Amino acid sequence: MNVKKAERTVMDAQEINRALTRVAHEISERSRGVTNVALVGIRSGGVHLANRLVARLKEIEGTTVPVGTLDITLYRDDLNARKEQPVLRKTEIPFDITDLKIILVDDVLFTGRTIRAAMDGLMDLGRPAEIQLAVLVDRGHRQLPIKATYVGKNLPTALEETVEVFLDETGGPDRVAILS
Amino acid sequence: MSLKRKDLLGIQDMPVEEINLVLETAESFKEVSGRDIKKVPTLRGKTVVNLFFEPSTRTRTSFELAAKRLSADVINFAVSASSVSKGETLLDTARNIEAMQADFIVLRHPMAGAPNILAKLLRASIVNAGDGGHEHPTQALLDLYTLREKKREFKGLRLAIVGDIAHSRVARSNIYALTKLGAEVRVIGPPTMMPLEVERLGVKVFYDMDEGLRGVDVIMMLRLQLERQGIALFPSIREYSRLYCLTPERVTLAAPDALVMHPGPINRGVEIAPEVADSVSSVILDQVTNGVAVRMAVLYLLSGGK
């Protein structure tokens, strides 16, 4: 049955823009610059956000930090439970992550399971000096002891609600909505 | 997305979308195989049994590596050392393996259709690793992967498959796959090694190698199966070699950037000249590398949808 869900916008383009700018500033402040920093966007929601943060950091620090893309499919903990295998995409991290400060980037932080998978995936690629996490939205309901280092917006939600992030790069326009 | 099937038995009944899904999925696994830590936890706790009723090093090792890189547990059943030599039937052997909770059985068997029988009767996923003169689907898939990597497009690609077409499961699986994908396939070999009415598979037949190679983009050599020549299909190896060995001179008849492929093991100087096997146009070792990634993709995709 296809019930149309009620939809409520919780962040518009300007708010997303401001949140990303603040997160970029926090990254450069916390790391005192961006030497040894690299961003890794988690497919698919984190990829474009990582690229936007790279552009912001370039404006702030004047340097382009390396950016990669991580597909966590092979590290999921629900492969046996699902009816269909998820489509496998490529992990593309064109630099050695060993001894770098890696900032994982994702759109929505929810149960924390994706981040657990992403950390396991990263560890198989090398030994980063540090892993941090930047998310556009933290909607709560963690099932694992995981916490974001940088949060664009804390968004209290009910468990049964869905948070959708629309971005210009994927047909947009930029906005975050709660579907209930 | 998964393969909508429990087993991989052949290319003949595989739609183009599923072939493409395997090839695309294999790209991700090739990246995994290029890492320092060549292992992902995806099939942790699953058991893959390699059940080989014919000698094989390359295919068995390739499946074993593929399963291990996905963190599955692998058992190899070599036939001479097993109870088959004590008279156990294929089905009983397979049922015993399944009773040990195997999730995948990779089967190579001298009888065409053996994997189909197991697939019907067992819950485990059956992967055909070569059944008689019938099919060898993962070999065709790894050949396709290699071709796609080097040539990008299948449409309009001109290929010649050379050798014992009639007894080759590699040829059969590749003919099914390549014609589906829109390539122009020629088969070259002596009349005694040509299956009856092979044209009905959508290929052009050439008995003269030089004529058949003219202008092709890919030359796919088959191994002369010296161990299978119970009945003489040609007077002598020397004569076969004179007529159908891929020499440097013959390579020049093909397109300038033509690829040379061979499923291995190669008989140097019989069907392929050493200097051709070792030349820059040869992608024989790329085929082996890609084989592991393609088999990882097959195991991954078959493990879904159950």
Image (tube, coloured by chain):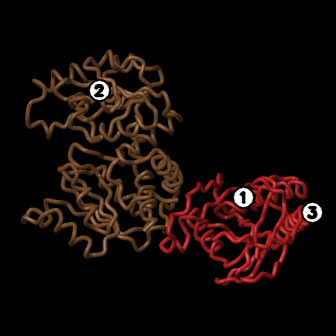
Q: Disc 1 to disc 3, how far (Cα)?
A: 20 Å
Residue type at tag 1: Val
Horizontal side of residue B301 vs A55, given as left or right: left
Say yes or no: labels 3 and 2 on the same chain: no
Q: Tell which subunit mark 3 falls on.
A: A
Q: Secondary structure at mark 2?
A: loop
Q: Quadrant of the C terminus of chain B?
A: bottom left
- Marking on residue A47: 1
Q: Are marks 1 and 3 on the same chain?
A: yes
Q: Nearer the viewer, residue A109 or A81?
A: A81
Q: Amino acid at mark 3?
A: Gln
Q: Chain of mark 1?
A: A
Callout 1: SS: helix
- Dot label at residue B273: 2
> Comparing marks 1 and 2, which lies closer to the viewer?
1
| Label 3: which secondary element | helix
Q: How many neighbours does mark 1 have within 10 angstroms: few (below 14), some (14-19), or many (20 or more)? A: many
Q: Give the amino acid at mark 2.
A: Ala
Chain drawn in brown: B
